[in-house]
Image (cartoon, rainbow, N blue to C red):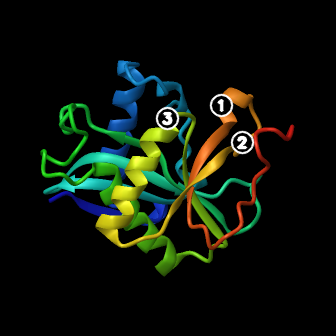
Amino acid sequence: MLKIYTNTPDNFKYIDQYKEVLQQIVTDKTDLLWKNYVDFNFAEQSALSVGLEGDEVKVISSIIHKPIWPNGVYRLLNRYAVVKDYRDTMTKTHHGEGHNIAQIMLDDQIKYLKQNIDYNFYFASRQKNKRFLDYWIKKFNKDYNYELAISEKRYWICDSTKFNCCQVLIYDPQYKIPFLPETEKQ
C-alpha cells in the first residue's frame, strides 16, 4: 500500500526526490498544467507530501496557504502529481486495488492539517469536471469516513484569469466558504 509522508519543507527528508519529480514534469511538458510546476516555491508551502513505495517517491503534493486568502485557509492536494509509470492509467488507482491515489493522500493531508496547523477552512479544487468530483468525493467519504462536499458554484481562489482561478471546491461544509463566487468579479 502506498505510504504517505507529510512534513514542513524545512524538515522534509524526501526533498531531493520531490525536486526530481517537479523537474521531470517541467522537462516532459506532457501534463496539461506543467507550467504550474515551473516556479514551485518550497518556502511558500505549509507542508509537503509524498506517496512512497519503499523509499521511492511516486506521488507529490503540498498544503499551501496563500497571502491573498484569509488567515487559516489552506489548500490541500496543491500541485498534485503522480510519477507517470506508477498509476494504473485506466483506473487511476493504486495498483488496481481500488484505492484512488489522490484519496490516500487527501486523507493523510487532512489528518496532518488537523494535528499540526491552526486552520479555519480547508479545500481541494479543480477547474472542471464537477460530475467526476461528485462521484470521487462520495467514494472518498464512504471509504475514509468523511462528510466533505462539492461546491455547487465555482469560486475565485487566485487573482489571475477567470479560467485559471474559478474552481469547484471540495470542502468541509461545516465551514463557510471564504471565497467570492465566480459571478462576482474579483
Q: Quick one: label 3 or label 2, which is nearer the N terminus? A: 3
Question: Which residue in the protein does label 1 denote?
Answer: 164
Rendered residue at 60%/67% (across/down): 173
Rendered position, 181 above or below 74: above
Residue 5 visible in image? yes
CA separation in Å, label 3 and label 2: 19 Å
For marks 1 and 3 on the same chain, the one whose residue lies earlier in the sequence: 3
- Residue 167 in the image, given as x and y percentages of width and height: 63, 41
Q: Measured from the top left, where is residue 34 in percent x and y?
A: 47, 26
Name the residue nearer the viewer: 171 or 77: 171
Write down the quadrant of residue 127 in the picture: top right
Mark 3 neighbour density, 10 Å: few (under 14) some (14–19) many (20 or more): few
Q: Amino acid at mark 1?
A: Asn
Quarter of the image with the C terminus in it: top right
Relative to 146, is 70 above or below?
A: above
Mark 2: secondary structure: loop
Mark 1 vs mark 3: give the one in front: 3
Residue 96 position, x and y percent, is 13, 45
Q: Is 125 situated left or right of 28 in this image? A: right
Q: In the structure shown, which secondary structural element does the residue marked by tag 1 occupy? A: helix
Give the residue at mark 3. 129
Left or right of 56? Residue 107 is right
Which sits earlier in the primary sequence, circle 2 or circle 1? 2
Pointers 2 and 1 in contact (C-beta within 8 Å)? yes
Q: With respect to residue 48, does 21 lie above or below?
A: above
Residue indicated by mark 2? 158
- Amino acid residing under circle 3: Asn
Q: Residue at x 53, y 25 (%)?
A: 35
C-alpha gap between disc 1 and disc 3: 14 Å
